[in-house]
Image (cartoon, rainbow, N blue to C red):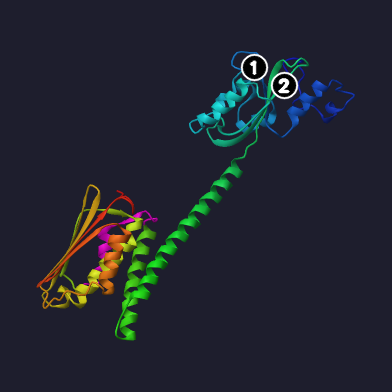
Amino acid sequence: MTDGSSGASFEGDPPAAAEQTVLADRRELALVAVERTRMPMVVTDPRQPDNPIVLANRAFLELTGYTAEEVIGKNCRFLQGPGTDPAGVDAIRQGLATNAEHVEAEILNYRKDGSAFWNQLAISRVTDDSGLLLYHFASQKDVTARRRAEELETTERLLLKEVDHRTLNTLAIVQSIVNLSRSDTAGGYSDCVRGRVEAVARAHKLLAESGWRGADVRELVAAEIANAPRGRVVADGPDLQVPSSYVQPLSLVVHELMANAVQHGALATAAGLLRVMWSEAPGHVTLEWQESGAQDVKQPSRNGFGLRILHTLVERQLGGKVKMSWADQGLGAKLRMPLTGAGQVGR
């Protein structure tokens, strides 16, 4: 690299060039130090139009991939690219415009090959004895690895927080199942709890497969009616992706309706049929449950766990409404849930 003022070339000079007897001039010694340091550095001249680079050391050229001929005489903005934050650029420009003694910033810059790196930039003023601004001295440091580590740490922290939140929600549902399930026998109680916990587990599996983005209602219903008598259940509705906050509550609701149909409703008889339908309208999603062919259907107590958990999950957790009717042919139910508060349907 050549110093424009003295014409002295330092690239490839032997180590003896730094000895005091060879370089008595401190300014020339400083140029050698700048050239040979591993810290990328440039010097710009604000007295010239557009504040061009007048000196760039070898470390800067290696960092950016440019040659000296490609950078000398240019403003440093050529390092900016599509991901560079305009606010960061404005902050640097404002610091220089107000003659700040030091300007520091971390900014996304780009090498000649287009690859991006995070640049920890520090700019200082170089003045003469009278305080007149002569140059800007700027050092750069590639802090990409540190930024990525920080971003990864932040992502991991958010992920752990989200996992903790989801785990607590699941455990709360399981705790409610255990606490509120009732049966006249130990075996019946065990079967009751196991079936409900398995429904939560199936919902968890659907969420895991979707990356916790949600689940399609068709898949959710299919998981709960998989063991139904062949040909006696019809599931019908559009492709409808519900958000993750709906999946476990809705799976457990369908499980409760299905368990009731098998034990007391249409599927408890040889001729019974079940139709499950769902639809989407602006602002809400609707699930309809219609049984037919049942015999001697009796309306269960609203205090029974199945109805209590259904009303609790739909009305309290999802903010929806439940309408039920018990005709001679079986249960009819309509669940209407808003798409605000609990989440938004995604396509």
Total marks in image? 2
In the foreground, 335 or 267: 335
Which residue lies at the image location 33% right of the left edge and 85% below the top edge?
187
Disc 1 and disc 2 in contact, CB within 8 angstroms: no
Q: Which mark is residue 153?
A: none
* Residue type for callout 1: Pro
Question: Marks 1/2: CA distance?
Answer: 10 Å
> Outermost residue toward the right?
21
119 versus 172 height, above or below = above
Quarter holding residue 221: bottom left
In the foreground, 79 or 65: 79
Q: Which residues are magenta?
A: 210-228
Quarter holding residue 223: bottom left
In the foreground, 341 or 40: 341
> Outermost residue toward the bottom?
185
Mark earlier in primary sequence (1, 2): 1
Is residue 223 in sight in this rendering? no
In the foreground, 119 or 87: 87
Quarter holding residue 64: top right
- Callout 1: few (<14), some (14-19), or many (20+) C-alpha neighbours within 10 Å? some
Q: Which residue does the numbered mark 2 point to in the structure image?
A: 126
Which residue lies at the image location 72% right of the left edge and 34% below the top edge?
38
Q: Which residue does the numbered mark 1 point to in the structure image?
A: 46
* Residue type for callout 2: Val
How far from the left and from the top, in percent, is residue 162? 46, 56
